[in-house]
Amino acid sequence: MALPTETASTSSWPLPPTQYINLYTDENIRRGRAPKPPLPIHNDYTMFGVHFNADDTIIRPLESQAIRRLYPQNFDHRRELKKLNHSILVNFLDLLDILIKCPDSTKRTDKIEDINILFINMHHLINEFRPHQARETVRVMLEMQKRQRHQVAERLERQEDEVSRLVREALSSLPDNLDLDSKLLVPSLEELQLRPKNDTSSASEDKCSSLDRLMCNIVDAL
């Protein structure tokens, strides 16, 4: 029974904080009962069993981790990576030679340690490209957003030009002289006096469909 507990305590990936997430319901947020987010860390902290300091650089130097550096302070990343890759291949061939000739020799352990340090140095050099990779990723994302917004603006401009063209065609298709009788548009005083006052249906119809009658009169006049 001790093995599952030990495995759970040393797991690199903790369980999802479902109990913490369940506190952020709509009702708790509306009533102000939801817990506030944790404050930013300004001192030391531990993550996945590794001790970190908030003031540490993003890529910590090898000396701070008690690891031997195999390349100088001022260097070319590409050149040093090629050299480390070549050294790993050579040491791996040496390790195979040792395993064939004298597998019980202590040189086998030393050679494995050398290969381990070579891989750590190579991994560290690759990690130093992470800030550059992050900047390039942000640049590409911004360029994509810019291109998408330009495409949307171009589509809107095309739609605007199409609508303007349709409006111009509609205006040009109208006749030049519209000789409409004013009696068709505005009822005379005599017609208003002759209408029965108790005709509520007619009044409601005039109130609801006056615009429709006006359009019909214009079409009939054409």
Image (cartoon, rainbow, N blue to C red):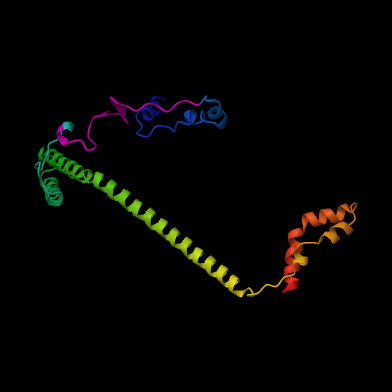
Q: Nearer the viewer, residue 173 or 100?
A: 173
Q: Nearer the viewer, residue 135 or 117?
A: 135
Q: Residue sitting at 56 percent across and 32 percent down?
A: 26
Q: Position of residue 119 (x, y in %)?
A: 18, 44
Q: Looking at the rendering, which quadrant does residue 52 occupy? A: top left
Q: Residue sitting at 24 percent across and 47 percent down?
A: 132
Q: Is residue 15 above or below residue 82?
A: above
> Is-magenta flag for residue 55?
yes
Q: Main secondary structure of the magenta part?
A: loop
Q: Looking at the rendering, which quadrant does residue 184 occupy? A: bottom right
Q: Position of residue 214 (x, y in %)?
A: 74, 63
Q: Is residue 190 above or below residue 80?
A: below
Q: Position of residue 45 (x, y in %)?
A: 30, 26
Magenta range: 34-63
Q: Residue sitting at 28 percent across and 50 percent down?
A: 136
Q: Residue sitting at 59 percent across and 70 percent down?
A: 171
On-image quarter of the C terminus = bottom right
